[in-house]
Amino acid sequence: MTPPTDKRDASRLFRDRLKQLLARSGLNRSAFAAGIGVDRSALSQLLAGEVTRLPRAETLMRIAAVHGVSLDWLLGLSQAEDVTAAIKRSLELEEAPDDRDEPLLEAWHAEAAGTKIRYVPTTLPDLLRTEAVISYESSENKRTLSSRLDEAQERIAYTRRPETDMEICMPVQRLHDLKGGTGLWTDLPAKARRGQLEHMAALVEELYPSLRLYLYDGQSHFSAPYTVFGPYRVSVYVGDMYLVLNAKDAVGTMTRHFDNLIRAASVQAHEVAGWLRALASGTQDPSGLD
């Protein structure tokens, strides 16, 4: 089955699946709505197709859990209805979201709650960016600034949950570029660059050990940007698309790749906050990795 190509397709497929679950349940609308944690009017809107926006990730997860179906089936991404079905696509392509109406990333995070999230960012980690950097990067991005600011706050809130276990690996050279205003950061003012480093240091310190940031040498090790969502899937960012790997072996391979980046890290998680502050203040040697 081809994944939905736009929000109208996604909404229609979700609505069809929701109607199937309602009919199958034998419940009236009020009882069905109560079971999935929404009110009757909200359920009626979803069933009638009055809005193209899909429910929040938590609601999608609740519907799937209560009625024993897979999240991919509920979203129209798979014909495999049973969450333990053996017939499951091992590789998919998903369009990268251009605003917050796209529920896939939120749903994948919700599905992986309580397991370890491993994340190699494209530039800087989403949840550690300042408003100035988000604004700067949004000028080159089709997503709106307000959407990205909201998303960053939601990511921070997610990381503050007691069950969160997240590891981030990124090349140390990217932060030296940020400090020096080179590469991606040529047009970002020095004050904003320093503010970003100090902001990262404060958040890394606050969120540790639920969030652990490691810095590796990007000259001796390479990684494409990707996220491992617990044991469930890997999402590799390839520009305007996500390459989604669901096969157990593929998830295991990417997990081992991430663990190798951690073993090669030149700055360990417990050292990063101090290292970032030293870099921001100019006491960290900008030509070295240590």
Image (cartoon, rainbow, N blue to C red):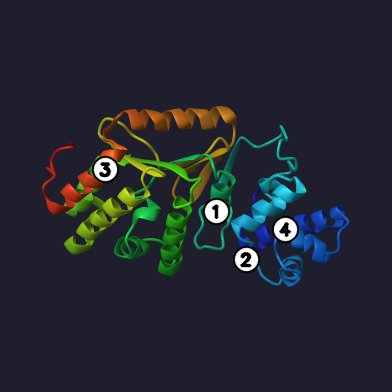
Q: Give the distance between the C-alpha atoms of the residues marked 2 and 1, in whole angstroms.
A: 14 Å
**Between disc 2 and disc 4, whose residue precedes?**
4
Residue occupied by mark 3: 272
Which amino acid type is shown beneath numbered disc 2?
Arg
Q: Give the distance between the C-alpha atoms of the residues marked 2 and 4, in whole angstroms.
A: 17 Å
Q: Give the distance between the C-alpha atoms of the residues marked 3 and 2, in whole angstroms.
A: 39 Å
Tag in front: 3 or 2: 3
| Residue 75 in view here | no
Q: Check disc 3 and report its element: helix, strand or loop.
A: helix
**Between disc 3 and disc 4, whose residue precedes?**
4
Residue 111 position, x and y percent, is 59, 46
Which amino acid type is shown beneath numbered disc 4?
Ile
Q: Label 3 neighbourhood size at 10 Å, few (<14), some (14-19), many (20+)?
A: many
Q: Which mark is residue 53?
A: 2
Q: Give the distance between the C-alpha atoms of the residues marked 3 and 4, in whole angstroms.
A: 42 Å
**Between disc 1 and disc 3, whose residue precedes?**
1
Classify the position of the N terminus by image quarter. top right
Q: Which mark is residue 36?
A: 4
Residue 136 position, x and y percent, is 31, 63
Q: Label 4 neighbourhood size at 10 Å, few (<14), some (14-19), many (20+)?
A: some
Q: Residue at x 73, y 41 (%)?
A: 80
Classify the position of the C terminus by image quarter. top left
Question: Residue 250 versus residue 26: which sits nearer the camera?
Answer: 26
Q: Check disc 2 and report its element: helix, strand or loop.
A: loop
